[in-house]
Every structure is written in C-alpha cells, then in structure tokens.
C-alpha cells in the first residue's frame, strides 16, 4: 500500500462546518515516500452544490485559480488569484484575514475548530525536521480546504459554474537542502489531501 493510500484511508470528510482529518496510527506517522499529485480540478462536493440549470453544457469552461498561502509561525494568510482576469481576493476567515496557525485533535480527528488537544508550533516542527509532521500536514490541508470553501461558497459562488483548476503558491524558507526537501514533501502531501 502506498503512503497516499495509507493517508487517504484515514481521511474522512465531515458534514460539520470544518472538515476533519483523521490522525494516522503511530506506526504510519513517519512517511517514507511522498507521492506528488498533479493539480486536481473541482471536487465532488463542489459539483453537488451547482444548480442543474446553471450547467448549460456538459463541458464547463476552465478557470485557473491560484491560492497564495502565507504559512506563518503564528498566523496564516491567503489570497486567491485568477490567472486570466488578473483578479485577486484576500480571504477573510470570519472577522479577520488571519487564520491562527494551529490545529486541534479530538477523537483521532484533526479540525480547525477549537475543540480537543491543541497542536501548535506547526511551522517550527517542520523547520526543525521533526520526524512526525502529521499535525503540520493536517493544518495545511484543512486550511487549504477552508480557503477554497470560503471562496467558492461565500465570496465568489459564480466560479462554481466553471471547471476550476487549482494551484497553490507557498513560500519555502531556504535554510538547508534537507530542510527544503522535507518542507516540500509535507506541502505536497497536504496539497494532495486538500484537493482529493
């Protein structure tokens, strides 16, 4: 079984406000391989909320949207940009444009809701090459999902009429080559979870 299959079996979408991500058991916490996936278009949940009458043809026009993701030590910020129209939208998380860089673990499920065990210092863990960066990967994946959801359901629902091709830009601090490689692996894994 590949790492991606192992991680995916612990991922369970939730009908709650925030999606949940299950914590892998201890024996699977240290990934030995990372599978890089190509950008993935619309998820099935987006297709479900598109009114039937808005789909005039079987093939929808593509739109390329990019998430600029600033993963900070204390807070995370995001901006979405449409490539063709040169439009940008800062993402507002409730009352603020800052999302606390922390995730919570409750009943073996990760969430951005403030319920359960606090998992913080996420960027620090990644920068110090800790073996288990599961909490960090879970935070980035859930944050990307939240950003996508806020944009397509609250800010610009008209984009649901298009075939959205998502991409993400995340800055990578360059400290050492080993650190940069670990950072990239964690980001690719989080991206794959967020857009699966």
Image (tube, rainbow, N blue to C red):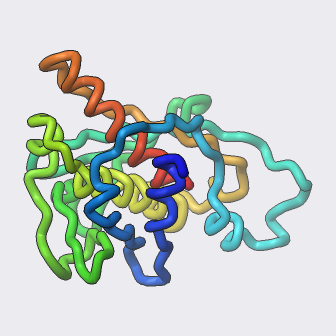
Could you tell me how many numbered marks the image carries? Answer: 0
Quadrant (top left, top right, bottom left, bottom right) of the C terminus: bottom right
Instruction: Tell me which residue sits at (66%, 40%) in the image.
Output: 63
Question: Can residue 88 be seen in the rendering of this structure?
Answer: no
Residue 152 lies, in percent from the top left, at 54, 60
Quadrant for residue 68, please give it.
top left
Residue 94 lies, in percent from the top left, at 28, 69
Question: Can residue 134 be seen in the rendering of this structure?
Answer: yes
Instruction: Tell me which residue sits at (31%, 51%) in the image.
Output: 137
Instruction: Tell me which residue sits at (59%, 62%) in the image.
Output: 157
Q: Is residue 77 above or below residue 54?
A: above
Q: Residue most toward the right?
A: 57
Q: Is residue 119 left or right of residue 66?
A: left
- The front one of 24 and 188 is 24
Q: Is residue 82 left or right of residue 30?
A: right
Q: Residue most toward the top?
A: 177
């Amino acid at each position: 079984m590949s790492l991606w299959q192992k991680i995916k079996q612990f991922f369970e979408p939730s009908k709650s406000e925030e999606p949940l991500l299950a914590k892998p058991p201890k024996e699977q916490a240290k990934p030995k391989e990372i599978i890089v996936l190509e950008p993935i278009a619309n998820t099935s949940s987006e297709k479900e909320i598109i009114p039937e009458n808005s789909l005039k043809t079987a093939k929808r026009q593509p739109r390329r949207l990019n998430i600029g993701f600033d993963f900070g030590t204390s807070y995370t910020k995001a901006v979405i940009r449409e490539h063709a129209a040169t439009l940008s939208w800062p993402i507002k998380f409730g009352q603020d444009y800052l999302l606390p860089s922390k995730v919570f673990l409750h009943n073996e499920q990760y969430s951005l809701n403030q319920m359960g065990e606090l998992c913080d210092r996420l960027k620090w863990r990644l920068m110090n090459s800790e073996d288990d960066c599961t909490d960090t990967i879970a935070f980035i994946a859930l944050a990307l999902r939240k950003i996508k959801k806020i944009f397509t359901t609250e800010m610009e629902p008209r984009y649901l009429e298009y075939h959205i091709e998502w991409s993400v830009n995340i800055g990578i601090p360059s400290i050492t080559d080993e650190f940069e490689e670990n950072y990239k692996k964690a980001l690719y894994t989080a991206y794959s979870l967020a857009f699966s």
